Image (cartoon, helix red, strand yellow):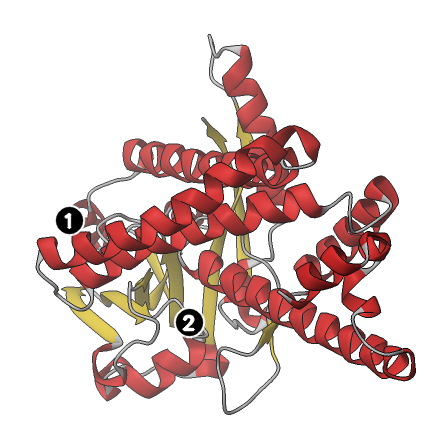
């Protein structure tokens, strides 16, 4: 209102109504204050991007990134180097491309308006799922929010051609990458189901004594808790040995931010030294697999970190016969994302000296 009153009295102040609203002697302090406010706001955006990325990684909707926890007290304080670099690069490109903050007004307006609309929609689902509101109560309040947010959005629709297309393009690219990653992981799971063998067959082979057993424990990580991991089958095929104790380990990410410490581990004794173990982590937890196994495995399973070997699968990908051009493009994008993902060794806090990777080629 103050800026509007200033422009009514002096239309020439349109060049910078915010700063011209203050007396001459206060403009330097006001500039310093505005700069500090911009720094605080940008830091909030950067921190939010880090937190969202960490949660998306835990939910497996994007590839793994190297994540550094910057606080021993607050698990939500994280630093993601890749995202930090991408934000810096994007900021430089936007400054060079648009030139002035005025030119970015359209992009900012559309982004804020859409954020408000999406937040109102998410409020409805939170009210129904988390707070257990009745549908009419949640829908009524959400409708009020959407009426206000919708007016802001309609007012900004005209800005799409004037820079407002930028947040739409960014959102479309990010959504495409996430859908491609989910598509690739689903196809990998389907191929794994086709190539896997029944657990009962492995137990029978171990009972017959045809497989040479070696001392120690082997942990085979699997994306599906009811399936034998490909790394185990490749180890039996090529090395023709099995450890005395074999853990089929599945890591599950919960919908809650933090897992209950008393329910983090489930285990099942399959026989012949074979165990099926599920570790549960919240999407904001750090998936420290060795620590969880050491603290939660029953004593009878004799878990010794220094004598345990972790086996991981390292896949390469190719398209099947008859695949169309769209699937080939998606596979290329998925393969690039998988190649640049943070190694499972670092993500699950595995000791590198105790990790063995076995390669396999998968047809998607």
Identify whether 186 is placed above or below 63: above
Quadrant the C terminus occupies: top left
Q: Is residue 247 left or right of residue 19?
A: left
Query: How far apart in space, not on screen, are marks 1 and 2 (Cα)?
Result: 36 Å
Quadrant the N terminus occupies: bottom right
Q: For residue 337, what is the image quadrant? A: top right
Q: Is residue 156 left or right of residue 245?
A: right
Q: Is residue 61 left or right of residue 4?
A: left
Identify whether 71 is placed above or below 81: below
Identify whether 126 is placed above or below 107: below
Q: How far from the left and from the top, in percent, is residue 271?
A: 16, 64
Q: Which mark is residue 284?
A: 2
Q: Secondary structure at mark 2?
A: loop
Q: Label 2: few (<14), some or many (≥20) within 10 Å?
A: many
Q: How far from the left and from the top, in percent, is residue 154?
A: 47, 37
Residue at image location 67% in from the left, 59% down from the top: 4
Task: Determine which residue is flagged by label 1.
Answer: 200
Residue at image location 79% in from the left, 51% down from the top: 101
Q: Secondary structure at mark 1?
A: helix
């Amino acid at each position: 209102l103050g800026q509007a009153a200033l422009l009514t009295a002096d239309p020439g102040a349109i060049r910078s109504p915010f700063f011209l609203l203050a007396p001459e002697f206060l403009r330097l302090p006001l500039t310093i204050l505005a700069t500090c406010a911009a720094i605080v706001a940008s830091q909030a955006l950067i921190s939010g991007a880090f937190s969202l990325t960490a949660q998306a990684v835990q939910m497996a909707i994007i590839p793994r990134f190297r994540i550094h926890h910057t606080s021993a007290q607050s698990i939500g304080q994280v630093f993601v180097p890749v995202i930090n670099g991408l934000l810096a690069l994007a900021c430089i490109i936007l400054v060079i491309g648009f030139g002035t903050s005025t030119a970015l007004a359209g992009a900012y307006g559309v982004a804020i308006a859409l954020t408000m609309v999406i937040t109102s929609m998410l409020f409805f689902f939170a009210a129904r799922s988390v707070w257990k509101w009745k549908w009419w109560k949640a829908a009524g309040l959400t409708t009020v929010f959407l009426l206000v947010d919708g007016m802001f959005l309609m007012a900004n629709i005209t800005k799409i051609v004037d820079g407002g297309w930028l947040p739409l393009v960014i959102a479309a690219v990010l959504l495409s990458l996430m859908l491609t990653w989910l598509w690739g992981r689903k196809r990998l799971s389907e191929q794994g189901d086709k190539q896997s063998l029944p657990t009962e067959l492995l137990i029978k082979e171990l009972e017959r004594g045809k497989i040479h057993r070696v001392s120690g424990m082997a942990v085979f990580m699997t994306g599906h808790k009811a399936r034998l991991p490909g790394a185990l089958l490749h180890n039996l095929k090529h090395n023709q040995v099995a450890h005395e104790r074999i853990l089929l380990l599945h890591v599950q990410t919960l919908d809650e931010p933090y897992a209950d410490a008393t329910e983090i581990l489930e285990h099942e004794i399959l026989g012949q030294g074979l165990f099926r173990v599920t570790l549960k982590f919240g999407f904001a937890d750090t998936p420290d697999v060795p620590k969880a196994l050491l603290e939660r495995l029953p004593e009878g399973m004799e878990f010794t970190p220094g004598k345990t070997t972790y086996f991981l699968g390292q896949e390469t990908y190719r398209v099947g016969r008859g695949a169309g051009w769209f699937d080939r493009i998606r596979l290329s994008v998925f393969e690039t994302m998988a190649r640049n993902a943070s190694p499972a060794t670092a993500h699950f806090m595995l000791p590198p000296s105790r990790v063995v990777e076995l390669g396999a080629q998968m047809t998607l």
